[in-house]
């Protein structure tokens, strides 16, 4: 479980740095929100329309992120609304599968990848219950999957990013850095260790470039965010 | 398939176990947890017998296994030398100094310390006392003359006698009882399957039967209640009689029956004084065998821990309390618990760091002056043992490896996979053409069901005509049997590798024809082989290579004797060095410093302990109690220090192969799949003083 850390800042952050961090956290929240949405359910018509109109960055400095965005963008550009059925089928193929063992799909649950027998509802899920409760978060009434679904983990990171942004905007630097430290610990514990395996399986099962791109994007973004959080906490230390 | 509603009759009658019959006039027991204390108890008893003027021919020391016997012998002789060294001084020095101290080389002695006026440091140097006999030389001769053996050896000697065979109904064609090898038991199992029980049920039943046999439960009324069990046990007995063979759990059981059934036989094997060493590692039948051969006195030296199968299957843990029940006047001495005073825990990042770190820690101990012989490393998995051995050898630290009993196993259903077993079978036939077990194996090789249905018909028909019939008679009288014997004629003068090559040639040439009932087929195949000359030399299978160590002149009999030693004994090589072994191997030993490597969940306790889909809660509780006993045993293996080593992460593939309990799997930054591992749940107990 990610443990709360206390970071004491003796001096206020420089204004330029504060502004940059606020912008960065806003971007992080949006990106995590996007990723979370893509994993939560199939792409629907409205969301697909938004995606088709979105300009994705071309050069972020991370090759995996760039490839991920490119694959998603190219797919959206090359397919009309007839793509919705293909995407829905691919969603099922990638995340649900049709086999009767633990290796028939890229099951988006942390317990599956981190437990010995690839079972759901294992220790990882139990840890996350505590983490969410500690953060004052509860699952929505319409959520029926286990708490260690990757969509929830990504959404949690997005929420924490937003809280960090708000804390920085309010001048609560200690709180902000504490939140960043928590995010670093959470990402290390609950994302960085198993997302690479999830991404590898997604690329194996995906039939469309869309979900292959999602795998690359997720893996690249987790790597980048880990580097960012590690460096930002190290700077403050 | 037989009806399960009929009540089977048991035609065997043996003397029921009468505990009073086993009672020994002077019985005593010493219970000590550490091996040193147990051996010391034996030494004290031997000295007492020697001082009482007992003849060494009237004394026997029975250990639980060959390894214990040789250790004990070495300990006793070493103890006598040590005693002689500390006692060996010039008597006049004692008068001057007023007390006897260990002599230091640079101690200055008074010039008048001896009548001859010279300085002496030992009686050996002093001519004044050269006429005095060395008392310890006499003790050494006494110990050298005492029979030090192991209980199965005695049991086999009993069963080899015609009187024992008459009592037990089990006749053997060779010099002694024919104990089934692991692969020969597979043929027995195939034959048992013809009764109709499912294989899994049959395996579980056999475990139950074997355990019961070691505990002499077959003499208890209504031991077997279900008709299926009674019939299968009866079937097994009939088959073993027909084969002139015995199972390992039966050896001591039949020996006790023989001794109780023939008092002359018992008198012939009796010793006035018996010392039973490592009593707790013996099966119940073996423990009672010690009672039966003790005419005047019996000293049982035991520890209290019996969770480890050192040599015999099913060591009898309740033997200590049964001893006092059989011998109510027995004196029981409990030696104070000793153990390590220093316990250290070393935690490593991963397995590679652990092997390197443990090696360095051992190197440090050696540098501090501890002899490598006095350092032990206990591992719970062969991979850890081999990695530690390799690391120690790379650091030029001498290592004493533990050789496991040779597992003579293979897939008898596939000729391509059991060539070494067929060669061993031919070797046995060369030694003894009346070996029914070997004939049964030869008859069944290469068939998916080991020709069990055919063999059953042959056996039932033969035993109906003559209950004392043996399969060898049928085999030698058959076409295929005669062909094999004819082929073996040419091997009688061969030895070493030449013999093996000839046997490999015979085994390969009769590939498709062994046991064939069609006339002429085997002979035809053999004649083709013999005309074409012996087959080109083929590389010998790994299983047979240990037998080549005997040299080019080794005969078939030499090889079979060596094979039986290898497959029924395990132990340390006679080299010196750090002992790297499993818990079973270390159970009878003691070290100044003990390293316990890989003490993590999954290795100890085993993985199943944590998986409630594989075991029940009751079984888990039972395993927990056994684990506690094992931890206490580990503590007793170290005189001064225990160093426990654990690791935190492990490669996922290695974890799966070794069944290490993986807490959390992850992929590290290099893309390697690893898992977090927890230190053993028993760690705190082990580190507790």
Image: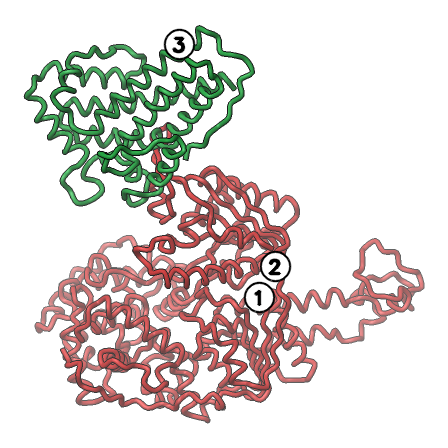
Q: Chain of mark 3?
A: A
Q: Identify whether B78 is placed above or below B265.
A: above
> Label 2 to label 1, Cα distance in Å?
9 Å
The answer to whether the residues at label 2 and label 3 have Cβ atoms under 8 Å apart is no
Point out residue B652 in the picture as x, y percentages from the top left corner: 35, 40
Residue under circle 2?
A: B339
Q: Nearer the viewer, residue A219 or B55?
A: A219
Q: Nearer the viewer, residue B318 or B536?
A: B318
Count of numbered circles on the image: 3
> Label 3 to label 1, Cα distance in Å?
70 Å
Q: Identify whether B85 is placed above or below A42.
A: below
> Label 2 to label 3, Cα distance in Å?
64 Å
Q: Chain of mark 1?
A: B
Same chain for mark 3 and mark 1? The answer is no
Q: Nearer the viewer, residue B207 or B404?
A: B207
| N-terminal-most mark, 2 or 1 | 1
Q: Which chain is green?
A: A
Point out residue B51 in the picture as x, y percentages from the top left corner: 70, 81
Q: Is residue B245 left or right of residue B369?
A: left
Quadrant that contains the C terminus of chain B = bottom right
Of badges 3 and 1, the one in the foreground is 3
Residue B246 disc label:
none
Q: Quadrant of residue A208?
A: top left
Question: Could you say whether the residue bearing mark 2 is in a helix, strand or loop?
Answer: loop
Residue under circle 1?
A: B33
The answer to whether the residues at label 2 and label 1 have Cβ atoms under 8 Å apart is yes
Question: Could you say whether the residue bearing mark 1 is in a helix, strand or loop?
Answer: loop
Residue under circle 3?
A: A20
Q: Identify whether B394 is placed above or below B58.
A: above
Q: Identify whether A118 is placed above or below B163.
A: above
Q: Chain of mark 2?
A: B
Q: Is residue B74 left or right of residue B311?
A: right
């Amino acid at each position: 479980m990610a443990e709360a850390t206390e970071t004491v800042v003796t001096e206020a952050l420089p204004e330029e740095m504060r502004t940059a961090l606020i912008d960065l956290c806003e971007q992080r929240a949006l990106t995590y929100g996007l990723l979370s949405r893509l994993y939560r359910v199939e792409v629907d018509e409205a969301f697909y329309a938004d995606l088709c109109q979105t300009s994705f960055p071309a050069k972020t400095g991370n090759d995996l992120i760039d490839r991920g965005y490119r694959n998603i963008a190219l797919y959206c550009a090359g397919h009309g609304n007839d793509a919705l059925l293909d995407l829905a089928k691919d969603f099922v193929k990638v995340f649900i599968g049709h086999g009767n063992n633990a290796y028939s799909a890229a099951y988006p649950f942390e317990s599956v990848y981190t437990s010995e027998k690839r079972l759901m509802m294992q220790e990882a899920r139990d840890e996350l219950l505590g983490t969410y409760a500690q953060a004052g978060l509860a699952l929505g009434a319409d959520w029926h999957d286990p708490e260690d679904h990757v969509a929830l983990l990504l959404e949690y990171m997005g929420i924490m990013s937003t809280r960090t942004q708000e804390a920085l905007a309010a001048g609560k630097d200690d709180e902000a850095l504490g939140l960043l430290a928590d995010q670093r610990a959470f990402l290390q514990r609950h994302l960085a260790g198993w997302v690479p395996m999830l991404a590898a399986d997604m690329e194996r099962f995906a039939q469309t470039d869309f979900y292959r791109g999602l795998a690359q994007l997720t893996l690249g973004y987790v790597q980048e965010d880990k580097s960012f959080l590690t460096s930002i906490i190290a700077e403050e230390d | 398939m037989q009806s399960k509603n009929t009540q089977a009759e048991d035609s065997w009658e043996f003397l029921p176990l009468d505990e009073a019959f086993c009672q020994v006039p002077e019985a005593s027991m010493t219970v000590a947890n550490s091996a040193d204390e147990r051996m010391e108890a034996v030494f004290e008893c031997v000295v007492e017998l020697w001082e009482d003027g007992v003849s060494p021919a009237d004394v026997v020391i029975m250990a639980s296994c060959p390894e214990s016997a040789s250790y004990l012998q070495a300990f006793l002789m070493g103890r006598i030398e040590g005693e002689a060294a500390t006692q060996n001084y010039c008597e006049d020095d004692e008068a001057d100094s007023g007390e006897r101290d260990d002599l230091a080389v640079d101690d200055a002695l008074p010039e008048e310390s001896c009548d001859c006026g010279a300085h002496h440091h030992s009686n050996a140097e002093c001519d004044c006392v050269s006429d005095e006999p060395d008392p310890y030389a006499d003790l050494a001769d006494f110990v050298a003359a005492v029979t030090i053996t192991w209980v199965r050896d005695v049991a086999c000697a009993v069963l080899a006698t015609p009187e024992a065979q008459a009592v037990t109904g089990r006749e053997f064609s060779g010099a002694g009882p024919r104990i089934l090898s692991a692969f020969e038991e597979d043929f027995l199992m195939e034959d048992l399957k013809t009764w109709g029980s499912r294989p899994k049920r049959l395996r579980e039943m056999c475990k139950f039967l074997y355990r019961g046999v070691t505990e002499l439960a077959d003499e208890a009324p209504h031991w077997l209640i279900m008709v299926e069990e009674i019939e299968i046990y009866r079937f097994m007995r009939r088959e073993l009689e027909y084969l002139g063979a015995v199972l390992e759990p039966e050896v001591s059981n039949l020996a006790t029956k023989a001794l109780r059934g023939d008092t002359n036989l018992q008198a012939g094997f009796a010793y006035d004084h018996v010392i039973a060493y490592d009593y707790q590692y013996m099966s119940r039948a073996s423990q009672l065998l010690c009672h039966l051969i003790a005419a005047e006195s019996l000293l049982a030296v035991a520890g209290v821990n019996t969770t480890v199968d050192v040599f015999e299957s099913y060591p009898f843990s309740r033997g200590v309390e049964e001893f006092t029940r059989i011998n109510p006047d027995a004196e029981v001495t409990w030696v104070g618990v000793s153990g390590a005073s220093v316990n250290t825990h070393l935690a490593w990042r991963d397995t590679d760091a652990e092997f390197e770190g443990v090696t360095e820690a051992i190197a440090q101990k050696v540098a501090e002056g501890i002899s490598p012989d006095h350092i032990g490393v206990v591992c719970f998995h062969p991979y850890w043992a081999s990695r530690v051995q390799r690391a120690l050898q790379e650091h030029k630290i001498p290592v004493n490896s533990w050789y496991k009993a040779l597992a003579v196993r293979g897939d008898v259903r596939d000729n391509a996979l059991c060539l070494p077993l067929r060669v061993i079978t031919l070797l046995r036939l060369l030694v003894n053409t009346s070996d029914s077990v070997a004939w049964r194996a030869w008859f069944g090789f290469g068939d998916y069901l080991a020709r069990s249905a055919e063999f059953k018909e042959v056996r039932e028909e033969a035993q109906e005509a003559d209950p004392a019939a043996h399969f060898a008679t049928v085999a030698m009288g058959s076409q295929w049997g005669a062909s094999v014997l004819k082929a073996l004629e040419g091997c009688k003068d061969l030895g070493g590798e030449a013999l093996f090559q000839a046997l490999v040639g015979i085994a390969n040439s009769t590939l498709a024809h062994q046991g064939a009932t069609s006339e002429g087929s085997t002979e035809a195949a053999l004649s083709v082989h013999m005309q074409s000359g012996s087959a080109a030399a083929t590389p010998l299978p790994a299983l047979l290579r240990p037998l080549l160590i005997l040299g080019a002149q080794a005969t078939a009999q030499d090889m079979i004797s060596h094979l039986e030693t290898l497959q029924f004994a395990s132990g340390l090589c006679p080299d010196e060095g750090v002992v790297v072994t499993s818990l079973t191997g270390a159970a009878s030993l003691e070290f100044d410093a003990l390293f316990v490597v890989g003490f993590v969940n999954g290795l100890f306790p085993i993985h199943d302990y944590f998986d409630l889909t594989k075991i029940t809660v009751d079984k888990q509780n039972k395993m927990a109690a056994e684990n506690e006993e094992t931890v206490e045993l580990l503590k007793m293996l170290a005189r001064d220090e225990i160093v426990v080593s654990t690791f935190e992460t492990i490669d996922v593939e290695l974890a799966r192969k070794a069944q290490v309990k993986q807490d959390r799997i992850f992929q590290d930054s290099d893309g390697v799949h690893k898992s977090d591992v927890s230190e053993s749940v028993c760690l705190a107990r082990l580190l507790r003083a």
